[in-house]
Image (cartoon, rainbow, N blue to C red):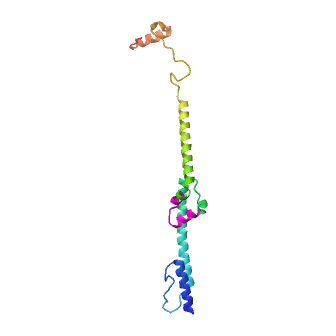
């Protein structure tokens, strides 16, 4: 009867771990029967530690994906069976998100590109508005030029005389 209970427990442990004979335990020196409950508990603890490590890895990856794609939400994506199936198969969070939410990603990228183009156009308009107007582009006429010495005023002739006195050559 005790052997039947041990065999049932061994079968349960084998089914949990997926390994044949995983629940078989050698008897100690005293010949006492192994504590099967402890073995099952230990296997469950190992599985929980492994599951926690995988989950923590997903959380770290999700933080990186959120930095790259501001629209990413792990809680929302966890409701998507295709996303969770990819994660269960070992696909990285970023790749799973890019596969499952491709349309939203494309819409976000198009929006980003449109905003960037709009900012470039506005910056160009602002820079052109800040530039001084050039001759010929303004609505008013150009500056009047005087031809020859006959059009010079008395102050213009005095300024030219000072320049000549300093040694500058002046021509008309």
Q: Is residue 49 above or below residue 126?
A: below
Q: Is residue 107 above or below residue 26?
A: above
Placement of the C terminus among the 4 image quadrants? top left
Q: How many marks?
A: 0
Answer whether residue 83 is magenta in the image: yes
Which residue appears at 56% of the width and 92% of the height?
Answer: 2
Which residue appears at 52% of the width and 81% of the height?
Answer: 14
Where is residue 86? Give x, y as percent. Answer: 53, 64
Where is residue 165? Give x, y as percent. Answer: 41, 11
Q: Is residue 77 above or below residue 52?
A: above
Answer whether residue 95 is magenta in the image: yes
Placement of the N terminus among the 4 image quadrants? bottom right
Where is residue 108? Give x, y as percent. Answer: 56, 50
Quarter of the image where one finds residue 15: bottom right
Q: Which of these two is toward me, 61 or 18?
A: 18
Q: Main secondary structure of the magenta part?
A: helix
Extreme residue toward the top, this view: 150
Magenta range: 80-97
Where is residue 113? Give x, y as percent. Answer: 54, 45
Q: Which of these two is toward me, 47 or 1?
A: 1
């Amino acid at each position: 009867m005790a052997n039947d209970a041990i065999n049932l427990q061994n079968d349960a442990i084998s089914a949990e771990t997926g390994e044949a004979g995983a629940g078989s335990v050698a008897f100690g020196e005293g010949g006492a029967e192994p504590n099967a409950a402890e073995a099952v508990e230990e296997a469950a603890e190992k599985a929980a530690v492994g599951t926690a490590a995988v989950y923590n890895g997903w959380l770290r990856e999700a933080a990186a994906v959120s930095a790259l794609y501001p629209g990413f939400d792990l809680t929302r994506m966890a409701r998507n069976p295709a996303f969770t199936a990819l994660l269960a198969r070992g696909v990285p969070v970023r790749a799973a998100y890019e596969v499952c939410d491709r349309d939203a990603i494309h819409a976000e990228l198009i929006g980003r590109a449109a905003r960037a183009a709009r900012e470039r156009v506005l910056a160009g308009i602002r820079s052109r508005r800040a530039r001084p107007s050039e001759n010929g582009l303004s609505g008013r006429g150009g500056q009047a030029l005087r031809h020859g010495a006959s059009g010079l005023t008395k102050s213009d002739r005095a300024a030219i005389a000072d320049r000549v006195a300093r040694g500058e050559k002046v021509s008309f």
